[in-house]
Amino acid sequence: MRKVLPVLALALACSSTRGAAPAAALPTHATPEQDARADQLLTGPDWYRHAVVYEAYVRSMSDTNGDGIGDLPGLTSKLDYLKTLGVDAIWLMPIMPTPFKDSGYDIADYRAINPDYGDMAAFEAFLAAAHAKKIRVLVDLVLNHTSDQHAWFKDSRASKTSAHADWYVWSDTPSRADIGCGTYGPQFGEQAWTLEPARNQYYFHRFYPQQPDLNYRNPAVVKETLDTAKFWLDKGVDGFRCDVIGLLVESATGCDMIPETLDYIRQLRGVLDRYPDRAMVAESKITSVTPYFGSGKDMFHMAFDFPYGYFWGLAFNGGSRKIAFDALSTAATGYPPGAQDASLIGSHDVQRAWTIARGVAWKYRRAAEISMFTKATPFVYYGEELGLRAGSGVVVDTRDSARTPMAWTRAPGHGFTTSPKPWLDFGEAADETNVEIEDADPSSMLTFYRQLLAFRRGHAVWGTGDLVMLDVDNPALLAFVRKNAEEAYLVVVSLSEDPQEGSVAATEVMRAGELVWGNAALTVAGASARLTVPGAGSAVFKVR
């Protein structure tokens, strides 16, 4: 149910207007006072609520040995850059050994490091360096399936009586009555069952045939995967991003977040709760985030808000706020107490945000502002801060267009590699869209992101303050209030390149507003407030 501010009879003696001129140029770095407050907020079990998380694809970050593939020492060398950007945590896409049939999401050994990226010593050095800079580290935990090259599956496929015979989902026919989802086919490919000649049986896979599903009805699988989580927590990682976690257990009536899967997630949460200050974020359903939170304290700390993060382009390209309004309203009123949204505008699974914005910079920036100012932990996909463009090369599948190497300089190899051929070709316009060029440009996307992260840093209201949606009488304007006991802000974002005006019910927090971000005007008169926003504009008013 939407939460809309009610009309309050304020009976103001006179009207007031704020924000007729653009806000002054904003700093690209937080003040020492902001950093001190941020250190306090980022300490303790609730650190994740106030963090900005950077999704890093080690393979595409920085190559130190000249083989064209990014590695852990390379990422370690970029920690200063990330710290300066304003990043508080890094989520690493899979770093375990893999045949690379699904970009590392086909894991062949849960307790080792992909040799392309280094070894366990390199990971431990990276982790120590990140922690020394007060940057936390989350690793991708892929529990639904393994690679077909994993030792467990090699043993399982060899014989019906092997030690791991029942660790995967097998059938004498390419279907099973108790697995209804197999009827509808896999996520990738044409069939969900593949014949294994050695057993003369079929194994189930929701994804590529090289990714057989684990059998979570086997207690040994449950124990081993929970022990895997303990292994990495003992290493010192700060938590996990859990890949397709809702699909662990299959049934005749469904295979998504059924009771047995919920029970496993609660067990996994119990493992994390035995370690101080750990957190995990769910790859949730595109249509529904709420089930991943449970009571708000017994399942995931965070879940990705895909209803906004994957569909914001429809709102901006259609000029109507409905998609964004509905998604944010659910976050405001539809989650259990304690739940935390994870906001984003891009990831390794969708097109680059620049592509979604159709190459229109203002749409890109407004979408990022919504992600940063709503009640959520913002996740920034690597290169997003540059407006990194899509590529055209394919190594695994078409999603590689959003997984191109990071461009650091304008030189050949763009500071990513000395190899004449990187593992994947760079995206378009890497000569202009790189850190060296954008670092020197006060109007660049990098400058904008630095300003954005500096602006919100050290203010608890952005991470945990109440989110109250405003029902503006203009569908091209999205507006909401963020408030806590210390301060309150009114955020307004236009989804149109034309100037817009709209009215909304006035409240006490909107009696006076200092323009602190962007460019718009706020006029309050009696019980009504009027917003005037220039084309493609946005603004944040400090109203308390």
Image (spheres, rainbow, N blue to C red):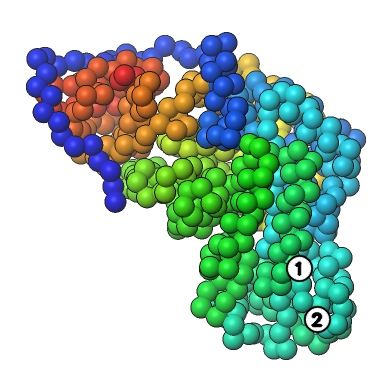
User: Label 1: which residue?
Assistant: 220
Q: Is residue 359 above or below residue 39?
A: below
Image x and y of residue 223, in percent: 74, 62
- Would you call the spot at circle 1 few (<14 residues within 10 Å), some (14-19), or many (20 or more)? some
Amino acid at pointer 2? Glu
Q: Nearer the viewer, residue 239 or 324?
A: 239
User: Label 2: which residue?
Assistant: 196
Image x and y of residue 398, in percent: 66, 56
Amino acid at pointer 1? Ala
For the point 57% across and 77% down, the residue is: 251
Q: Nearer the viewer, mark 2 or mark 1?
A: 1
Q: Is residue 488 above or below residue 115?
A: above
Q: Nearer the viewer, residue 46 or 212?
A: 46
For the point 74% across and 29% down, the residue is: 130
Q: Nearer the viewer, residue 315 or 529?
A: 529
Q: Is residue 333 above or below residue 507?
A: below
- Going by the image, does 291 lie left or right of 481? right
